Image (cartoon, coloured by chain):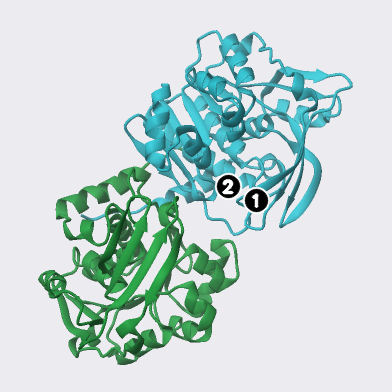
Chain colours: A cyan, B green
Amino acid sequence: MSLLTVGTVAFDSIETPYGRVEQVIGGACTYISWAASYFQENIYLVSIIGEDFPQSELEQLKKRGVNMDGLEIVKGGKSFFWEGKYHQNMNSRDTITTELNVLADFDPVLPKEARKANFVMLGNLTPAIQAKVLDQLEGTQSLVALDTMNFWMDIALEELISVIRRIDILIINDEEARQLSGEHSLVKAAHKIFELGIKYLVIKKGEHGALLFSHDDIFFAPALPLAEVNDPTGAGDTFAGGFMGYLSASNDISMEGVKRAIIAGSAMASFCVEDFSLNRLKTLTKEEISNRLKQFKKLIHFDFID
Amino acid sequence: MSLLTVGTVAFDSIETPYGRVEQVIGGACTYISWAASYFQENIYLVSIIGEDFPQSELEQLKKRGVNMDGLEIVKGGKSFFWEGKYHQNMNSRDTITTELNVLADFDPVLPKEARKANFVMLGNLTPAIQAKVLDQLEGTQSLVALDTMNFWMDIALEELISVIRRIDILIINDEEARQLSGEHSLVKAAHKIFELGIKYLVIKKGEHGALLFSHDDIFFAPALPLAEVNDPTGAGDTFAGGFMGYLSASNDISMEGVKRAIIAGSAMASFCVEDFSLNRLKTLTKEEISNRLKQFKKLIHFDFID
């Protein structure tokens, strides 16, 4: 099995109540690839960067089994840059700077092998670009997941909806689900969104966990209560990466299989927020991941005696 | 086993985006007693009302096994009245009116049998009144739970803390836990609150579920995702009532036993919000409750294959 991931590879400057970092490694595709690499060894990354992006970062990803043939490096170009500042409660943040740079001209070209990937994770990008990726797939994929954001609902809703009609799993947060559906209740929101023909809907609720909907079932995955959250940046992408990494490795896309993948994604996200940038994700061991999965199991386990 | 519950029996006028009701039955002790009565048949209610409170309501509670010897009825007095209006998202509300009426002179006197109750649920009241109830217990109780609110943290923190030092389970919401501890992280908040000597801490997160902390363990109970939430009034008290009703019936105060009780409380709360006032709680069947408990189990069940 293989996983194709398309999205940003970028620089971030981040301020949280617990510190500030400048020009660190970020980007949806970076987080997705790192998180997925703990489950899946056959990953195709498709993205665009400038000449300013450190070669050593690319080497580290290659060592994790990430194929970079689809990474366009623009000579003399600058990589996408985002600067944000989190509020005291970490639940909201302000964007200080967004510099598209080379991303403005991103026109993804999938390497031949990537077109046959079994699993596809479309990170948050213009719906038109996400559609271009779908156009290049050879139709052999088992499952395509897509992340998006309210910004595209505001300015490109029609395009977004036609992309969603072509995918299998939509991964959005609670506010985005409400905006997309016009329903406050997430149960009603899911019901409406399923009219677009998807197989599964994942609604992320940050520190409150995530809901997984199939057409006729619902599953709740908690977030691990943490004493220290230093930087939430990339948590959603890490969740998606862990989720799709696990799913593509197991190749079990039944509701039970997808539930397990959601727990894997939640576990990876719980590591991500412990430190800034990809710091925590880069140092994980299999044992740490296995222990955290057990913590999730223990967190919600109860035996009900009727 | 028996359960003593102390708190308000009152009238509410409530406006939500889904309707408005005037002078309906409310009060913490009413919700607690109704919810507990589905698990525990031996309940002592201690409260105060005016002559305006309908006799038929008291008769209904008596039929559920609720002993009313500790209910003071003030001749010519008016019952406690609260009027509130919920915001569009139902997560916050404004208090329009609070009329203490007979509650202003509430000086609870426990009937002889109630002093020997095995389980005690202190609903949200002035800490001084909660202390007076504790003073009258004969010391034979297995477990005392207490609910409170930010208002008492603002104006009577010292008294509140000395009452908390005397109880076993504190039941508060996330914002109250943060205020009481001065910590944003609920894990850190729990750690600090445990310094007061309690055995368990329950942190309610409304639609996001509830966390149960013991000294060295943590359990997460989800809230059931609902399509229709018509009135959240009393949900927290219903949770506490279902929790203490189940716990007192099982008489199992181990962490595993308390986990099961949390699920029972969550199930009862999920019914409460479906309709205004006590409407839904009054019509429940054992089968409906059993089915809902199964829904909770299913909602979070997964088999992880390492």
Pointer 2 residue:
A270
- Residue at left offset 51%, top offset 49%: A223
Instruction: Check the image and name the residue furthest to the right.
Output: A76
- Residue at left offset 15%, top offset 55%: B286
Residue A240 visible in image: yes
- Residue at left offset 20%, top offset 64%: B39
Q: Secondary structure at mark 2?
A: helix
Do discs 2 and 1 belong to a common subunit?
yes
* Rendering coords of residue A123 (x, y %): 61, 28
Indicate the amino acid at tag 1: Glu
Front residue of A93/A228: it is: A93
Indicate the amino acid at tag 2: Ser
Chain letter for mark 2 = A
Rendered position, B238 above or below B7: above
Front residue of A126/A279: it is: A126
Q: Is residue A50 left or right of residue B176?
A: right
Front residue of B116/A34: it is: B116
Q: Is residue B149 left or right of residue B117?
A: right
Q: Is residue B51 left or right of residue A188?
A: left
Residue B305 visible in image: no
Rendered position, B77 above or below B194: below
Tag 2 near tag 1, CB within 8 Å:
yes
* Rendering coords of residue B207 (x, y %): 41, 53
Q: Secondary structure at mark 1?
A: loop
The circle on residue A274 is 1
Q: Is residue B219 left or right of residue A48?
A: left
* Rendering coords of residue B136 (x, y %): 30, 91
* Rendering coords of residue B189 (x, y %): 55, 67
